[in-house]
Image: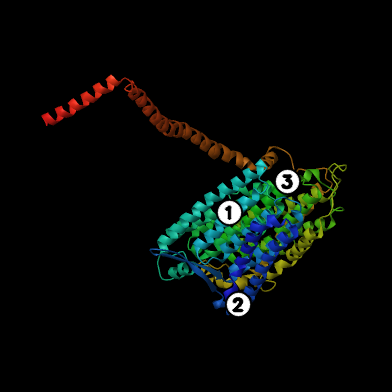
Amino acid sequence: MVEYFYLITVLPLAGFLFNGLFGAKFKNEKITGTIGSLTVFGSFVITVLAYLHITSLPEDSRTIIVPLFNWLSSGSLNIAAAYLVDPLSVTMCLIVTGVGFLIHVYAIGYMHGDKGFARFFAFMNLFIFAMLNLVLGDNLLLMFLGWEGVGLCSYLLIGFFYDKKFTGDAANKAFWMNRIGDFGFMLAMFFIFMTFGTLNFQQIFSTLQSTTIATSTFTVITLLLFLGATGKSAQIPLFVWLPDAMAGPTPVSALIHAATMVTAGVYMIARTSVLFALSPIAMNVVLAVGCLTAFVAATIAIAQNDIKKILAYSTVSQLGFMFMAMGVGAFSTGIFHVTTHAFFKALMFLAAGSVIHGMHNEQDVAKMGGLKDNMKTTFLTFLMGAIVISGIPPFSGFFSKDEILSKLFFSGNYIVFGIALITAFLTAFYVFRLISLTFYGKPRYDETHVHPHESPAIMTIPLIILAVLSVVGGFIGLPHIVGTNLIEHFLNPVFTPALSIIPEHHIVASTEIGLIIASVLAAAISIWLSVRTFKSGEKLDAFSGGYYNFLKDKYRVDELYEAIIVKPLLWLTEQSYKIFDVKVIDGAVNGTAKFFNNLAIDWRKLQTGIVQDYAIFSIAGILAILLYIILR
């Protein structure tokens, strides 16, 4: 069975090639959509078989290398293309293929009638292929290939509606922000190769056991890796691209936010957890950045009215929670939240897409209201997602969020814990503001032109499945005081080397119960306050004043970047153009032409057309030659 694991990536690649080469010729949405979806489903089935296979093995033997071919060989650099199948990569593959399949099915209905239908599914399949290579690669270079692949696909899909300027701008913004992070990733790879002589994960980890390396080296490497993670996973200061990525079709937003792309940074830190564990400074930086990002994004989400941007800032905030978990060494908890977040965030984005579909492309919640009777399935599933992300038990978001809060508290980071608890309060507030303004109150749209309607079954069935997963998914990670944390037990062999370095924190059962009560109480109060404020639809803003406008303007970070980075670069480019391009390049080209033109004018005077003049020149030349011979 192991020899067939490579099909996990090959099937989506085949779907990309088929739809990319022949999809537009067939002009049949059913064939294109079915092939695009089934190839991802096939990968999901093989991933399930891979899961069953590795769980049948002893815990210390749950790492399988699937060799493909020799890739690069130059001097001491020898890299084989091979897949690393272990509990961590299988968990990620289950998320990517399982949730990705449901998003593909949903997209068949959402993209119906679009002229770029085949191109869309080709790009979506390529996205899945790139992400699977990222999580399965057994070395940093193969991971980086997938890393760049998801960056390319996000650019193509965010800018899918290429005839609109704002989509192109959003795609370019995502592209450049990610290039900054990718530069850090590349530098980290250079340092890793200089230090360990390899880019293979297992060889790096085995070298650690037999070599003494300065802590400062690990700090440099891990901070550079984290720079790459801040770009891909939209953390401060490289977070501004993700909300603008909403310019793409809604299924793209769901795929980026739930199953691919933004989870790559979290996965990369989890995969290199041993390196991070050896650098306390880097761990603290990850913790601090995650905490700040979670809080800032949550405050911005409170003041937004675009239904997709509210969810986008929610994703940025939830990613901050994942990085906080990584920063205190709770690696399996971070991956647990990646898993539950994939369920409920895919659900909420697809439900938002259903609202947009039913509202004839309207995205402003201030122009909605009273939709729950017209879109019952969408309303109920969206509501389930809101309850889940708010952290209400026994839904999945409660278990993973509470586990993170618990790890923060017992690690002794009380200030970070307090900020995280406030952020959890804000999360419930903004998400129920979204629910209230969208589905409750009187309609605030023009009822003569807009007729809200429920989406077709091909869109609502994935919503129902994701709602069920969002409700029950948390039971794989029960708190220790309740039962067995299955996902932690499953991932334990991967993170044991890192956890052996990080001091273990003793968990007090009574204190954990108190933390659970506090987090649930905070969420419940927040929900009550939000619904009470916005349910009637008469009030659209949480409060008024300069600070609220500041939140609406997203802390004016984009304006700050425009002032200190974009405009200076544009000025420098203009000056470089005027000096180097105009004066140096154009001056050299035009000056050369002018020189030869003047030379030609001077020499042209010698061409008189008079035979006697030519005879004189000939005689003078002969005399000059004779004189030279005589004098020599």
Q: Residues within 10 Å of mark 1 (few under 14, many from 20)?
A: many
Give the distance between the C-alpha atoms of the residues marked 1 and 2, in whole angstroms.
Answer: 32 Å
Residue found 63% across the figure and 42% down from its top:
555
- CB contact under 8 Å: marks 1 and 3: no
Q: Nearer the viewer, residue 622 or 242?
A: 622
Q: Which mark is residue 151?
A: 1
Instruction: State the mark number for residue 306.
Output: 3
Q: How many neighbours does mark 2 have within 10 angstroms: few (below 14), some (14-19), or many (20 or more)?
A: few
Mark 1 or mark 3, whichever is nearer to me: 1
Q: Which mark is residue 66?
A: none
Out of 524 and 486, give the one closest to the viewer.
Answer: 486
First along the sequence among labels 2 and 3: 2
Image coordinates of residue 353 in percent, x first then y, are 75, 53
Q: Is residue 137 visible?
A: yes
Kindly identify the residue that appears in the image at 59 percent across and 52 percent down.
235
Q: Earlier in the sequence, mark 1 or mark 3?
A: 1
Q: Count every numbered label the image shows and give the total.
A: 3
Q: Amino acid at mark 2?
A: Met
